[in-house]
Amino acid sequence: MTELLERRDYGALIRPTEVHGSLYTSEEIFRDELARIWYTTWVFVGHESEVAHPNDYVRKKLGPQDVIMTRDRDGQVHLLLNRCAHRGNQVCEDERGNSSSFRCPYHGWTYRNTGELLGYPFNRGYGGKGALEQRLALGRVPRVDSCQGFVFGSFAADGPSLAEHLGAAAGELDRLARLSPEGRVELTAGWLKHQTRANWKLLAENETDGYHPQFVHGSIFSVTDSPIGALYSDKSAAVTRDLGGGHSENDLRPEFRKFGQPMRWFGTTEQRVPEYVAAMRQAYGADAEQILVEGGPHVMIFPNLFVAEIQVFNIQPVAPGECVQYVTAVQFAGGRELNRRVVSQSIGSVGPAGMLLADDTEMYERNQAGLAARSPEWLDVSRGLVREAVDADGHPVGTATDEVGIRGFWAHYRALMEAE
Amino acid sequence: MSDEVTRAEAEEFLYLEARLADESDYDGWEALWTDDAIYWVPAGRADADPQAEVSVIYDNRNRIATRLNQLRTGKRYAQSPASNLRRLISNVEILGRDDRGDTEVGANFLLLESRPRGLQLWGGRTTYRLRRTADGLRLSYKKVVLVNLDEPLPTLGFLI
């Protein structure tokens, strides 16, 4: 085993039904992941609505990298690295704001919000104005693209397009947007930042693991008569789907269709949100019933975007045993009546004190601690293989509690880690 | 309008509330709240709108009860086993009265939390609103502004 680790033979560390524990703990593997995943593939960074107006900016993370998401005066979104081209100082200190330029506090170098160098004081020291502008600029994430306003960055100058990366998962973001009467979501409710002493992959795997809710969340289900537990039981009609590309979902629609009640997916009835339901029927006509019955997606988009019906999670790694979960409440354009409830439900559920996510996070951290044990060296990911099927679109599917999504995650992870 | 709460009365109440929270005495702590209570721990910035932006905690009285009921199951894993806690409260000031006649009190706090994860230091400024009732002082509002409310926070499973 030591030899496999030293060679970092990912084909040997990742087997069809088990994965090696070192994948969650090794410093060397974490460094490989930064190079082959976080600094290569498309990573979720933020949402266009966070920089709604020309010259808005907000600071974000792309892996351990500190980036500034800006919207220039022409409306284009950029991801700039927060590092002056002169001495490497950070050029942006504020969390967010509106400015067409950034001025480094150290020697006063100034950059446009597209990254280009505008000026440097006492420029005769460099031979006058125009001497450096062609040569120096802020670092840029070379490829930036978006889907339903979700902004992704890729540090690879070439490679699959965002559409190719998202594949079938793009349809899940479309489903989310269709819950807005205006067909548009906004991430404007602020972000909870939850420090997590666990490897980022434990989170990515857990997001569509329908096996754990009855156990980890039994405490809150039992005191609130929550219907969520039943979604993830042996009796549930919901399915877990490997969407390809490392993406996976818990497709809860079959369960909600059984009841056929609008807004049941949100744990309420249409009478409680009449304005929202009316606006949806106005906007979508005959399609509205289906949208209101089926609800939002529960999808993990590789490597770090998790949409949990009404919340969006942005998972960013810090170290092998540490990551941060950034989470916000989705706001549906034109859905004001619903949006306040989404904020309230989200505060109750997620973040450091959330009645769901604090317990998930406790599991992540105990899981990370447990992985320090010397044996058994492997984690089992075989659940549901005995009954796995392939759906009409060619995606592997299992029941609500099967580990289909986890196996899909590892297949894609392995492909990226072994890529030349 | 009833008499204003004195600083000595306020301190006595704050220390009681702190001890019940430190000792995870859920019944004793729950009994301190009024029926219209708000328990708020903002995230990001202290003046965020809790109706429109996410908070770490924004509980009305019903949700305080739900939170405590979850803790009482013993399977709220983020707090099972319970953290070992002790907090110091200082800089207590009477800030005035609100339009319901409740006395607003400000105080700073430092809190040590010990869990298997390690020793965690929490600190900040708390605003309390205290109401005189037939049963003595009760808490109608508690807002806890952490000094690091804009930074990533570890799990906060205990009563802060």
Image (cartoon, coloured by chain):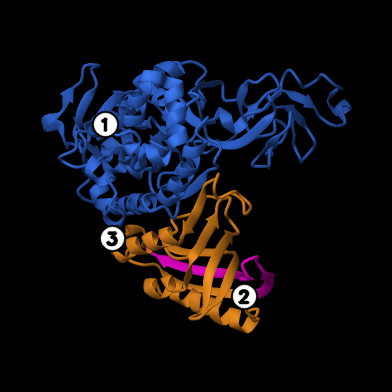
Chain colours: A blue, B orange
State the image quarter where residue A286 is shown: top left
Looking at the rendering, the stretch of residues picked out in magenta corresponds to B90-117
Q: CA distance from mark 3 to mark 1?
A: 33 Å
Q: Is residue A162 above or below residue A14?
A: above
Q: Residues within 10 Å of mark 1 (few under 14, many from 20)?
A: some
Looking at the image, how many numbered discs can be counted on the residues?
3
Indicate the chain on which mark 3 is placed: B
Q: Is residue A11 visible?
A: no
Query: Residue at label 2?
Result: B90
- Quarter of the rendering occupied by the C terminus of chain A: top left
- Secondary structure under the numbered disc 1 in the rendered image: loop
The reply to whether the magenta stretch includes residue A107 is no
- Secondary structure under the numbered disc 2 in the rendered image: strand
Task: Check if mark 2 and mark 1 are on a common chain.
Answer: no
Query: Residue at label 1?
Result: A260
Q: Residues within 10 Å of mark 2 (few under 14, many from 20)?
A: some
Expressed as whole percent of the image width and height from the top left, the position of residue A50 reads 59, 33
- Secondary structure under the numbered disc 3 in the rendered image: loop
- Residue shown at 61%/67% (left/top)? B100
Q: Is residue A356 above or below residue B62?
A: above
- Residue shown at 17%/36% (left/top)? A382
Query: Residue at label 3?
Result: B75
State the image quarter where residue A295 is shown: top left
Disc number at residue B23? none
Q: Nearer the viewer, residue A313 or B95?
A: B95
Which residue type carries mark 2?
Ser
Q: Is residue B47 above or below residue A31?
A: below
Q: Nearer the viewer, residue A323 or A257?
A: A257
User: Which of pointers 2 and 1 indicates the residue nearer the eye?
Assistant: 1
Indicate the chain on which mark 2 is placed: B
Q: CA distance from mark 2 to mark 1?
A: 56 Å
